[in-house]
């Protein structure tokens, strides 16, 4: 089975601040972050949600109706948070999103106005209900015009929005795939855009679309997805390479035919070559992704993958050197290297 910790660490919708993302992911994996509390007022849609927020704010301890509230125990941070929750309830979200959609359709608006419109929409659509409402308002029709924008910032925002909308959302995935030109446009951006950040964001959007959706994955492959993944793996752009590996890691478990697609088309050789130079060329917090991906493929196709790894010159030596560079307590030692016996 796929390593869920890796998905948490590399589930990967925003590269603007990698250090913050990695810290947040580490908090989730290690348990130092808030597991069940809700901290985004934009998720409030009704009074039942407000009650849940209030419960969270009181540390989960229900108070008797006769119990006196200690005002001093209600921190400024909590007061501000509750104020934000209540103000969110007074916002007409559909009107806000509809106004933003109209701005994005207006070619006379400046790039900064388009960026702001995207930011307004982004405040709401990480809630799956609002994401679906965005589609019902006709919001998907802004994708192609914005993808063709001359401004890289607008193209980046478009890809980020698509990632948010389709990730773990079967309704938006289905609606997105009703017009295959959307996916074709994302593929073209990865292949041809002259801005590296746009290319990375487009591949991240594709990743959000195809994970956990086998029919969409195979449609992606039919549209040239296999070559896109292979070319991205070989790219000199590290972030593009990492996005490609993440797609492999998060989809190879979807079926033996998916794993065979990767194994039979040289993915193992490419990942092995990356691992051989990983100690010097790849940030340490990405090592787990590459090692986990190879081990996913070993579990799914042990004979073929081990045979390929054995045939890669100096791979075992490089792997031993990489293992020795970690401390004995390192998670890499126990979880990965013990599986790699060729």
Image: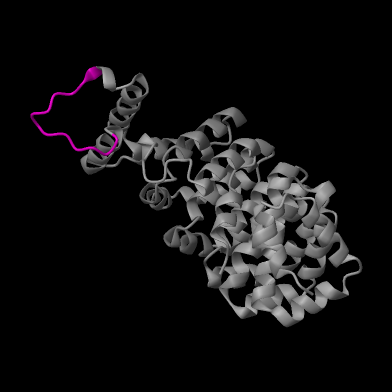
Q: Nearer the viewer, residue 92 or 214?
A: 214
Image coordinates for residue 170, horizontal then vertical, percent = 44, 62
Asked if residue 276 is positioned above or below residue 142 in the image, the reply reads below
The front one of 220 and 70 is 70
Q: Residue at x 72, y 72 (%)?
A: 262
Residue 65 on image: x %, y %: 10, 32
- The image position of residue 210, as x and y in percent, is 57, 63
Q: Nearer the viewer, residue 253 or 178?
A: 253
Judge whether residue 219 can be spotted in this image. no
Q: Residue furthest right?
A: 313
- The colour scheme applied to this rendered structure is one colour
Q: Residue at x 67, y 51 (%)?
A: 330
Q: Is residue 172 visible?
A: yes
Task: Point out the residue furthest to the front here.
Answer: 328
Look at the image and give the residue range highlighted in magenta. Answer: 59-71
The answer to if 328 sits in the magenta stretch is no
- Image side of residue 82 versus residue 318, left or right: left
Is residue 70 one of those drawn in magenta? yes
- Classify residue 252 as left or right of residue 36: right
Pick whichever, 142 or 250, lies toward us.
250
Residue at the far bottom: name it: 303
In the figure, 250 relative to 9: above or below?
A: below
Residue 220 vertical position relative to residue 78 in the rendered view, above or below: below
Q: Extreme left residue here?
A: 66
Q: With 7 as the anchor, is 230 left or right in this view?
A: right
Name the chief secondary structure element in magenta.
loop
In this view, 34 is above or below 183: above
Question: Percent x, y for residue 309?
Answer: 81, 72
């Amino acid at each position: 089975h796929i390593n869920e910790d890796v998905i948490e660490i590399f589930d990967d919708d925003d590269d603007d601040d990698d250090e913050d993302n990695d810290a947040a992911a580490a908090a989730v994996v290690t348990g130092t972050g808030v597991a069940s509390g809700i901290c985004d007022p934009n998720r409030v849609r009704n009074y039942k949600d407000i009650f849940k927020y209030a419960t969270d704010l009181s540390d989960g301890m229900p108070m008797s109706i006769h119990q006196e509230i200690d005002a001093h125990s209600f921190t400024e941070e909590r007061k501000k948070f509750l104020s934000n929750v209540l103000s969110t309830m007074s916002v007409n979200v559909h009107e806000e999103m509809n106004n933003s959609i109209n701005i994005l359709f207006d070619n006379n608006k400046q790039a900064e106005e388009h960026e702001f419109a995207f930011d307004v929409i982004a405040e709401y659509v990480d809630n799956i209900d609002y994401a679906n409402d965005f589609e019902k308002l006709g919001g998907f029709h802004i994708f192609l015009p914005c993808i063709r924008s001359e401004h890289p910032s607008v193209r980046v925002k478009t890809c980020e929005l698509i990632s948010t909308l389709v990730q773990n959302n079967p309704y938006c995935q289905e609606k997105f795939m009703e017009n295959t030109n959307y996916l074709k446009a994302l593929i073209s951006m990865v292949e041809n855009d002259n801005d590296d950040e746009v290319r990375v964001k487009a591949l991240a959007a594709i990743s959000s679309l195809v994970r956990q959706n086998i029919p969409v994955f195979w449609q992606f492959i039919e549209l040239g997805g296999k070559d896109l993944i292979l070319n991205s793996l070989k790219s000199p752009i590290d972030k593009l390479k990492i996005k490609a590996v993440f797609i492999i890691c998060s989809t190879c478990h979807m079926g033996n035919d998916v794993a065979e697609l990767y194994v039979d088309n040289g993915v193992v050789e490419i990942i092995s070559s990356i691992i051989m130079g990983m100690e010097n060329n790849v940030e340490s917090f990405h090592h787990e992704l590459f090692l986990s991906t190879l081990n996913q493929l070993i579990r799914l196709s042990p004979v073929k993958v081990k045979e390929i790894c054995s045939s890669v010159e100096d791979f075992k030596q490089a792997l031993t050197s990489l293992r020795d560079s970690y401390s004995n307590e390192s998670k890499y030692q126990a979880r990965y290297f013990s599986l790699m016996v060729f």
